[in-house]
Amino acid sequence: MSKLTRKGLAGVLVLGALAVVGMTAPATSAQASSKYLSINNYSNAYVRTKRTMYVGIYQKHGNTYRPLLKKKGSLLKVTDTEQKTSKSPVLASFTSGAVHYSRLTQLKFTDTPSIPLTKANFTQVTLKAPIRGTILRAGSGFKQDKAGNFGNSSAFYLTLDNYLQYYSKAAMIKNDPAGTMFVTNGRTAAKPSATAKMTKTTVKGNTTTVQYSSPIKGVPGKKLSAHNYQLKIKNLKTSGDNYFDDNSWHGHWDNYTINNKPFFSGMIYDFD
């Protein structure tokens, strides 16, 4: 049996709070559907504000937090919705999504859905680069080391505010030994080992091309010129599985290449 117990798994500090793929919101009634947005998948639910407004996000000012006024056109991650009855308003809670660590540490979010998710105030959007916020781990799939760790490879992700945020192997073992981190929704994050400013992002088919300003050891960037490096992130559209400790743990992941080197994104499940 792995040294990671179920209790230890629950106590792991992940880089971003988990957003479970396939989690669905309560169904919006037909009566309310004309007025409110219907969110069906929290793992990929983003909206933009249609006007300047408060959305339950607070920004640090000294030792206190004050409501943050979001400008028209601001991108938000929907984290939860609630409709108590068919005649009740559809309420939502938001974060700023997977933004840079230094920005995230200045923010606080309301957990309980409290903002009416009206079509008059919000429009649902799809990210032009859906790879953003996805934890990309070096290697070809989960492996377990002698200490019982699964989060034992370096990793990085692309933030919504255009940073490449990198975590060394040591940082991953410290912050995600169970390998349970697979997507970020922007409530919390561990301090990155290094960051670089992204200057350009394009998507063509299954490939996301990212240019960024400075090299990071552990990220297989191609140097284009001084202060300009490039990653080609290709989603292979294939997946992998592995079982550990007499099937007590199950690892599942999606396969990528980054500048032709193997990477993956996935999760470990505890069957005990």
Image: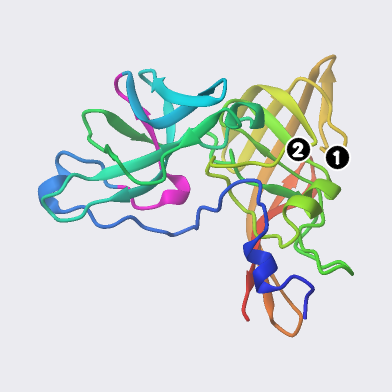
56 and 261: which is toward the camera? 56
Magenta-drawn stretch contains 250: no
115 and 234: which is toward the camera? 115
Q: Secondary structure at mark 2?
A: strand
Residue neighbourhood size for the residue with mark 2, other residues' Cα within 10 Å, grouped as few (<14), some (14–19), many (≥20): many
Tell me the magenta residue range: 39-51
Residue at 42% from the left image edge and 50% from the top image edge: 42
Q: Quadrant of residue 7?
A: bottom right
Q: Is residue 13 left or right of residue 263?
A: left
Q: Is residue 253 left or right of residue 225?
A: left
The residue tagged 2 is 166
Instruction: Note whether residue 137 is visible.
Output: yes
Quarter that holds the N terminus? bottom right
The label nearer to you, 2 versus 1, is: 2
Q: Amino acid at mark 1?
A: Gly
Q: Is residue 100 left or right of residue 194?
A: left
The residue tagged 1 is 218
Q: Amino acid at mark 2?
A: Tyr
Task: Determine contact: label 2, label 1, CB under 8 Å.
Answer: yes
Residue at 65% from the left image edge and 27% from the top image edge: 102
Residue 144 is situated, as x and y percent measured from the top left of the image, at: 82, 68
Residue 33 is situated, as x and y percent measured from the top left of the image, at: 17, 46
254 and 159: which is toward the camera? 159
Q: Quadrant of residue 250?
A: bottom right
Residue at 66% from the left image edge and 65% from the top image edge: 9
